[in-house]
Amino acid sequence: MLLLYFSRFYWDEKVKLEDSFNATIDTLVQALDAKDTFTRLHSERVAAIATDLAQVKGLDEADRRKIAYGARIHDIGKVGIPDDVLLKPIRLTSQEFELIKSHTTRGAEILKPAARYFKEVLPIVLYHHERWDGRGYPEGRAGDAIPLWARIVCIADAYEAMTAGRSYSPPKSPQRAMQELEDLAGDQFDPELVKLFKGIWLQDPIWKDREVFLRSYTSPVPSLDLPLPSRSESGSATSPKSG
């Protein structure tokens, strides 16, 4: 009986801890979106795109849910980047660009205290700027050495960024952004995933045009709910210009 009591107490405390951590992550993501008018609801649109791409890739609902979660927090490391660098409207210095690139490892560090629960989505945060040809960051991984979920979010992130625009780059049309993805397939992006992406893009999904997506998105940013383990479980298309 005493063992059952402590087991329930431990589980309840674990749930409270994860709820608290998720609330903190949620706040950080919303703060990041609020920093830059170019990126309003950026993470939500990336999540919508990545979810559709994961579905046509054949991933099940549970995996799609986790990918959507990872997409929402993929840029969380940018909360540690100074605004004067993150929002700089002109060409970045090489030193500033290196600072921007550090958001992948910074994001992984933010999640590290709860790495046990984020182990499946952490690679999205860490590797979504790797390139198919091995010239990305932070590790220079290439091809299938880049986790699939990160390759999916990489394409979603690039399309969203290109069509949203940035302080240093005007927005591209959906058609131009799609063409750029195709041009860089096999270099920056997984070529198979680009083909799958174009297939759903041609169906005019709600996320295809950013303004349509923003007008249709009327609900507040949802909480970032990551499923807890069961009780039985044991303990470049988008890179800022630099010069």
Image (spheres, rainbow, N blue to C red):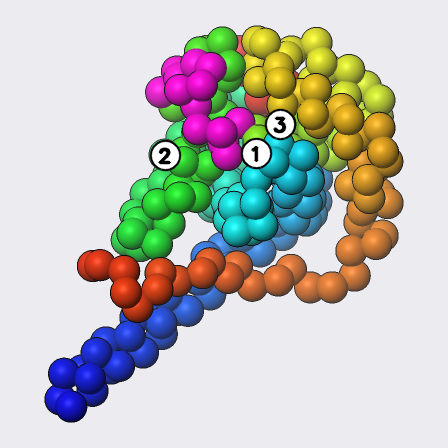
Q: Position of residue 158 (x, y in %)?
A: 64, 27
Q: List the residue tagged with mark 3.
A: 155
Q: List the residue tagged with mark 2.
A: 105
Q: List the residue tagged with mark 1.
A: 153
Q: Is residue 153 above or below residue 26?
A: above
Q: Residue furthest bottom?
A: 1
Tell which tag, 2 or 1, sits nearer the viewer: 1
Q: How busy is the neighbourhood of tag 2: few (under 14 within 10 Å), some, or many (20 plus)? A: some
On the question of residue 96 being in view, the answer is no
Q: Residue furthest left?
A: 2
The range drawn in magenta is: 139-151
Looking at the rendered structure, the secondary structure element under dot 1 is: helix
**Residue type (three-letter) at the residue carrying disc 3:** Ile
**Residue type (three-letter) at the residue carrying disc 1:** Val
Q: Nearer the viewer, residue 16 or 161?
A: 16
Q: In the image, what residue occupies the spot 35% across and 45% down? A: 119
Q: Is residue 101 above or below residue 187?
A: below
Q: In the image, what residue occupies the spot 63% across and 23% down? A: 193
Looking at the rendered structure, the secondary structure element under dot 3 is: helix
Q: How busy is the neighbourhood of tag 3: few (under 14 within 10 Å), some, or many (20 plus)? A: many
| Res 89 label | none
Q: Position of residue 46 (x, y in %)?
A: 64, 40
Q: Is residue 67 above or below residue 242?
A: below
Question: Along the polypeptide, which appears first: circle 2 or circle 1?
Answer: 2
